[in-house]
Amino acid sequence: MVVRFVLWNLADSKTTIGELRRYLRDESVEQFADVPGLRFKAWISDETTERWGAIYLWESAEAAEQTVPSQASELICKDPEIGETFDVEATIEGRFVVEELSRLGLAFER
């Protein structure tokens, strides 16, 4: 398994975190539901520093190399400042068990 981490600085972008949240809620999350080899994806943000990114957990390095259905780079009008892939050394699930991890987070809070 591998983890892919991408991070943008939105300070010099015309896109806001609010606009990207709407994009997640209305389009992006659903598009990732059936991506082959994707075990987990979390979109992340920090409004104070105007940063936006994602963490992907892939079944294999080959799966991580595929083109994904994301328009984030187009919406932000640039490639991420950070885009790196790491091998997963170990995983664990904590004691707190959530029945459903899908569609949690600020983009879905209204």
Image (spheres, grey):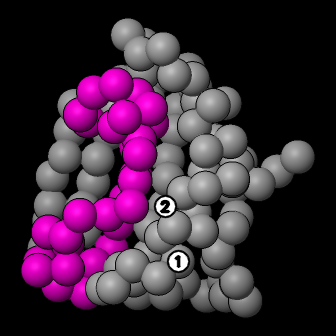
Q: Is residue 17 left or right of residue 52?
A: right
For residue 87, which quarter of the picture? bottom left
Label 1: which secondary element? loop
The residue furthest right is 110
Q: Residue at x 39, y 79 (%)?
A: 35
Magenta stretch containing residue 3, yes or no?
A: no
The residue under the point 27% across, 27% down is 78
Horizontal and vertical percent position of residue 58: 28, 78
Q: Vertical placement of 55 versus 97: above or below?
A: above
Residue drawn at x 53%, y 32% is 46
Q: Which label sits on residue 6? A: none
Q: Which element type, helix, strand or loop, lies under badge 2?
A: strand
Would residue 68 be visible to someone looking at this image? yes
Instruction: Tell me which amino acid carries mark 2.
Output: Ala
- Residue 7 in percent (x, y) is at 32, 39
**Could one spot residue 49 in this view of the protein?**
no
The disc label shown at residue 33, or none: 1
75 to 2, vertically: above or below: above
Structural distance between the alpha carbons of marks 2 and 1: 12 Å
In the image: residue 89, left or right of residue 36: left
Camera-side residue of 98 and 59:
59
> Looking at the rendering, in which quadrant would you find the N terminus?
bottom left
Give the number of the mark in front: 2 or 1.
1
Q: Which residues are magenta?
A: 52-80
Q: Mark 1: which amino acid?
A: Ala
User: Which disc is residue 42 wearing?
Assistant: 2
